[in-house]
Amino acid sequence: MKNILAFVIVAATIIACGNSNSNTGTASAAKTTAAAAGPDGEKIYKQYCVTCHGLYGDMGASGAHDLTASALTVEERIEVITNGRNTMTGFKGILNEERIQAVAEYSVKLKKK
């Protein structure tokens, strides 16, 4: 009886470890795919832009434009994010072009239809 119980415990441990490794592999694959897709515009927006524009783009602190009503194209948004406008500071010295584009593309999603 002790041998059967020991076998069941060992088998359960092996199965449990095997399953956790396959999940880790899936998580690693997901991270690799996300990294290959480029920077996360939402994450960057939340780090640098939320203070003035707010979480939903409509806060307007310090004269920030309401992104929910903005008619700017992605290219125009890239220009504003890069060089700034009015009271907004440009981010060309802080973010690279790829990250600026990611933020611009994310900011379009904040627009109310």
Image (cartoon, helix red, strand yellow):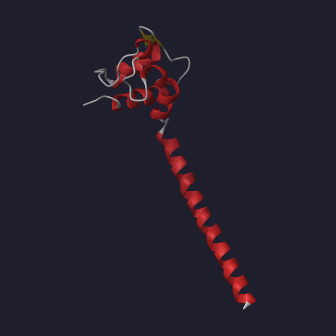
**Quarter of the image where one finds residue 76:** top left
Q: 112 left or right of 106? A: left
User: Residue at (40%, 31%) from the top-left corner?
Assistant: 106
**Quarter of the image where one finds residue 10:** bottom right
Q: Residue furthest bottom?
A: 1
Locate the C terminus by quadrant: top left
Query: Which is nearer the eye, 39 or 107?
Result: 107
User: Residue at (40%, 26%) from the top-left corner?
Assistant: 104
Q: Position of residue 105 (x, y in %)?
A: 38, 30
**Quarter of the image where one finds residue 64:** top left
User: Residue at (29%, 22%) from the top-left corner?
Assistant: 69
Q: 57 left or right of 95? A: left
Q: Position of residue 58 (x, y in %)?
A: 36, 23
Query: Which is nearer the eye, 38 or 53?
Result: 53
Q: Position of residue 5 (x, y in %)?
A: 70, 85
Locate the N terminus by quadrant: bottom right
Q: Position of residue 93 (x, y in %)?
A: 55, 17
User: Residue at (47%, 41%) from the top-left corner?
Assistant: 37
Q: Is residue 70 above or below residue 62?
A: below
